[in-house]
Image: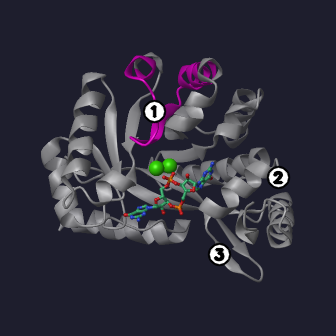
Amino acid sequence: YFIYEAASDPSNPQRLMLMGDLRNAVDHDQLFPHFQPKICLHTGRVTGVETLARWKHPERGPIPPDEFIPLAEKANIIGPLAMGILKKSMAQCQAWCRKGGNIPVAVNLSAKNLLDRTLVKKVGALLTEQGMEPNLLEFEITESALMEDPTHALNILTAFRNMGIALYIDDFGIGYSSLAYLKKLPINAIKIDRAFVMDMTKNSDSATIVRSTVALAHNLGLKVVAEGVEDKATLDELAALGCDEAQGYHISRPLPADGLDEWLAKASSRRTN
Ligand code: C2E
Ligand code: CA
Ligand code: CA
């Protein structure tokens, strides 16, 4: 026996309706990216932005990506969703380049995106169409996505790296990748999961995980980014640990492109003053 719970029923009518609305939004290209800056912990300079997908439902308002990304995977529309966000992120990156700023954009790819055998070709075609330098594009892929089919993931990552795209392992610390496997992957950087960063100044276990991850990444010749930096104490501690880059609400929330332009202007005037 079990007790019926509408929220966990994949075919509950509300969820099915939301799935239909999401399909419609993807078909009509109504999803859009927000951008959250990452800064270098040594110089304070912006090193790039992470692209985070946003969906504003016509009646329900903003729906968080933690809710609509799994829905898109279920509805088999994660491919077109990712391509739509990727295209808009590339267009924005090109707009920044035209204004004289080279700001790399990091786009999230889900496990289901990696299963698309034509993904590498599609990304290459988009880069050509947008006239974008591949070294301004970065992909964030979670540890667990890479573990679903390690051999296939290795092939895709190798193809992206050969194109000049930088690769990040996202949410590091909550997956189960073996060190031997990590060493084989052609990745550039590790992003420490925000769960550990957010409480590292209060919880000694989290602090130990962050410290060990920084050491591990550096020993493997990888860069380390800490996400979920919510206060100055955390920022200072990360700098003291030798972490390379930081991202989080303390620096800036994810912003629409024009909001980020304003933030960048303020950040550069803070540096020159
Ligand atoms: P993620 O890739 O780990 O992205 C970081 C999340 O942490 C974002 O949540 C961001 O808004 C949030 N965040 C940033 N700084 C802080 C902080 O200081 N404190 C706290 N508490 N949170 C912070 P968001 O935008 O709600 O996205 C949630 C997740 O949805 C992402 O986690 C990612 O897994 C997924 N996602 C978002 N956009 C896309 C996309 O275009 N494609 C795919 N496949 N997944 C996406
Ligand atoms: Ca991410
Ligand atoms: Ca993450």
Front residue of 163/129: it is: 163
Q: Type of residue at label 3?
A: Pro
Name the image quarter holding the C terminus.
bottom left
**What residue is disc 2 on?**
75
Q: Is residue 16 left or right of residue 239?
A: right
Nearest to viewer (mark 1 / mark 2): 1
Checking the image for residue 241, the label placed there is: none
Mark 3 C-beta closer than 8 Å to ligand 1: no
Residue 240's x, y, as percent? 12, 47
Checking the image for residue 176, the label placed there is: 1
252 is higher (above) or lower (below) than 91: below
Nearest to viewer (mark 3 / mark 2): 2
Q: Please report the residue visible at 50 percent of the width from the left and 68 percent of the height from the top.
A: 255
Q: Please report the residue visible at 32 percent of the width from the left and 70 percent of the height from the top.
A: 266
Give the colour scheme of this rendering. Answer: one colour
Residue 120's x, y, as percent? 69, 28
Element type at marker 1? loop
Front residue of 256/225: it is: 225
Q: Which residues are magenta?
A: 153-182
Q: Type of residue at label 1?
A: Tyr
* Residue 8 shows in the view: yes
Q: Please report the residue visible at 22 percent of the width from the left and 32 percent of the height from the top.
A: 215
Q: Are marks 3 and 2 in contact (CB under 8 Å)?
A: no
**What residue is disc 3 on?**
62
Front residue of 93/196: it is: 196
* Residue 41 shows in the view: no
236 is higher (above) or lower (below) than 250: above
The quadrant in which residue 29 appears is bottom right
Label 3 vs label 1: CA separation? 32 Å
Q: Are marks 1 and 2 in contact (CB under 8 Å)?
A: no
**First in sequence: mark 1 or mark 2?**
2
